[in-house]
Image (cartoon, rainbow, N blue to C red):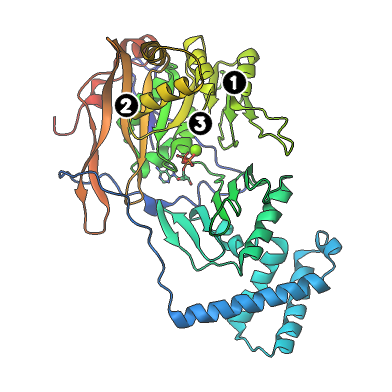
């Protein structure tokens, strides 16, 4: 377990800390942790940038595919019959037992009428699928229940991908046709009080279980509706688990603990699905319970463990185009709520100005994430975002603003083998002329790939002591030099 740096011990000797994510009452701690995702840091060898691996597809035997199609047809036919004969009004009140019984009856009758004989396994599966159709989200219900699935990506009725352990896989799950898919989309969005149709062809929503949901329907979606679901995981990955999965090292965690505790302003940067929100969540574990934190997100995903938290979520405009509450509105309001720290789930628009201002004016220790591929890239993204707000600020002034607001850039990356790593921790140290100066404290050095396609490499320190060493010391985090030393030094 990661031993937290103990600032109250005379030599900073680490103490064992409780796991940063409290296990939920209902489930044992992180039962569903995707352990296979995490290759350990491996041996060294030189490597070049590799392209992301192409999605792995599941080869289906044509005979089996035909059988599945036939089963799907039967299921749709029976589903139609079910809807005709079930008392829909009573559906909500019916117990699952009653429903199962009813479904078994109707399906037996239907199969007899259609002259279809199924083996008992198929029959059982069919009844389970029918229950999912009636009470749940049809074909994707199994994927939603599968804890190893992180993302569900639907490209029209015939193609459903999932992401498992950082790798995309094509599944055998299919919808009967576009109408079937639309019905499921409708079911999802109407449950959260939204709608999607030709006139408003896309929707971004948070599902009742906390999952993030986005759908785009035809005609804007050219080959059939596009759906993306980022499943909500109750058990967020803790610092301990991230270390265990090889996302970063204990030395890096010690550094990050000091950085968060001494209230550096931190930007977590990374590509889509690289683990930015997960990292932000884990880092927040280093914030003390005595601080007041306000979080701002488009879709509330963060699950901070502190006591004193105000959570806010932006709201899209309604059908008449009214009632929008943007992240920027929330951020401005947050400044009046006496927060010690502000955490913005993702900075992507004009809230950037207010975020930087907040970081510059007394809300030290604020954090956010940004879509970018490197620390330098993240700075360019910030510059672009500032330019896009329409605020007339010369580039050098934007840079000065960024360099005085942001202290630390943490770069996360999803590598081609599906592993997610903290590939760089970079400090912003000031300005040199018109350029923002930075120093990389830790990085992941890729060295090659083993025969299973697993990326090899190791985390190394840049050999530099932190620019914030004195600040850390003043706050009681007199970090040992050893965290900046590489094994072979
Ligand atoms: N180091 C890790 N090891 C294994 N799984 C991880 C790791 N980091 C994140 N994940 C998993 O990857 C998925 C995506 O993570 P997360 O939501 O944090 O990404 P993100 O960068 O915020 O994505 P987006 O760009 O869509 O907001 C989650 O299911 C999360 O549990
Ligand atoms: Mg995110």
Provide the residue designation for mark 1: 331
Provide the residue designation for mark 3: 346
| Circle 3 crowding by C-alpha within 10 Å: few under 14, some 14–19, many from 20 | many
Does 435 sit above or below residue 153? Answer: above
Using the rendered image of the protein, determine whether residue 6 is visible from the camera's viewpoint: no
Q: Does ligand 2 reach within 8 Å of label 3's beta carbon?
A: yes
| Circle 1 crowding by C-alpha within 10 Å: few under 14, some 14–19, many from 20 | many
Asked which secondary structure carries label 2, the reply is helix
Mark 1 vs 2, N-terminal side: 1
Provide the residue designation for mark 2: 376
Residue 180 place in picture, x, y as percent = 65, 65
Identify the residue at horizontal 34%, vertical 12% (top origin): 473
Q: CA distance from mark 2 to mark 3?
A: 18 Å
Q: Which mark is residue 122?
A: none
Does 313 sit above or below residue 212? Answer: above
Does 489 sit above or below residue 362? Answer: below
Q: How many marks?
A: 3
């Amino acid at each position: 377990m990661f031993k937290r740096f103990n600032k109250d011990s005379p030599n900073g000797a680490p103490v064992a800390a409780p796991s940063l994510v409290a296990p939920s009452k209902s489930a044992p701690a992180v039962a569903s942790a995707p352990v296979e995702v995490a290759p350990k840091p491996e041996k060294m060898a030189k490597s070049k940038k590799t392209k992301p691996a192409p999605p792995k597809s599941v080869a289906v035997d044509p005979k089996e595919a035909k059988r599945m199609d036939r089963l799907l047809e039967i299921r749709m036919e029976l589903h139609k019959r079910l809807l005709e004969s079930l008392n829909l009004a009573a559906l909500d009140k019916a117990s699952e037992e009653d429903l199962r019984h009813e479904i078994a009856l109707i399906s037996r009758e239907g199969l007899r009428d259609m002259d279809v004989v199924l083996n008992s396994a198929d029959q059982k599966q069919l009844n389970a699928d029918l229950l999912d159709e009636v009470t749940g989200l049809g074909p994707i219900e199994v994927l939603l229940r599968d804890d190893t699935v992180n993302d569900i990506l639907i490209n029209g009725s015939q193609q459903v991908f999932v992401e498992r352990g950082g790798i995309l896989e094509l599944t055998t799950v299919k919808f009967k046709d576009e109408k079937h898919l639309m019905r499921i989309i409708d079911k999802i969005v109407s449950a959260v009080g939204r709608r999607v149709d030709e006139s408003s062809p896309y929707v971004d929503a948070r599902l009742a279980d906390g999952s993030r949901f986005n759908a785009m329907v035809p005609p804007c979606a050219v080959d059939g509706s596009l759906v993306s679901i980022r499943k909500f995981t109750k058990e967020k990955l803790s610092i301990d688990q991230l270390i265990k999965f090889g996302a970063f090292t204990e030395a890096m965690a010690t550094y990050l603990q000091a950085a968060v505790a001494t209230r550096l302003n931190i930007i977590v940067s990374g590509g889509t699905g690289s683990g930015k929100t997960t990292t932000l969540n884990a880092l927040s574990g280093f914030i003390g319970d005595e601080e007041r934190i306000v979080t701002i997100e488009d879709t509330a995903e963060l699950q901070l463990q502190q006591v004193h938290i105000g959570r806010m979520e932006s709201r899209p405009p309604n059908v008449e185009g009214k009632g929008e509450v943007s992240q920027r509105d929330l951020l401005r309001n947050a400044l009046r709520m006496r927060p010690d720290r502000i955490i913005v789930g993702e900075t992507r628009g004009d809230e950037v100005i207010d975020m930087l201002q907040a970081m510059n004016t007394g809300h030290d220790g604020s954090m956010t994430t940004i879509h970018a591929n490197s620390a330098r890239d993240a700075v360019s993204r910030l510059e672009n975002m500032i330019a896009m707000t329409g605020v007339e600020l010369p580039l050098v002034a934007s840079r000065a603003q960024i360099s005085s607001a942001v202290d630390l850039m943490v770069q996360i990356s999803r590598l081609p083998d599906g592993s997610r790593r903290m590939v760089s921790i970079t400090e912003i140290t000031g300005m040199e002329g018109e350029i923002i100066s930075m120093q990389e404290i830790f990085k992941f050095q890729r060295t090659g790939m083993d025969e299973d396609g697993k990326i090899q490499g190791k985390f190394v320190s840049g050999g530099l002591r932190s620019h914030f060493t004195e600040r850390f010391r003043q706050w009681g985090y007199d970090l040992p030099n050893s965290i900046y030393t590489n094994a072979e030094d």
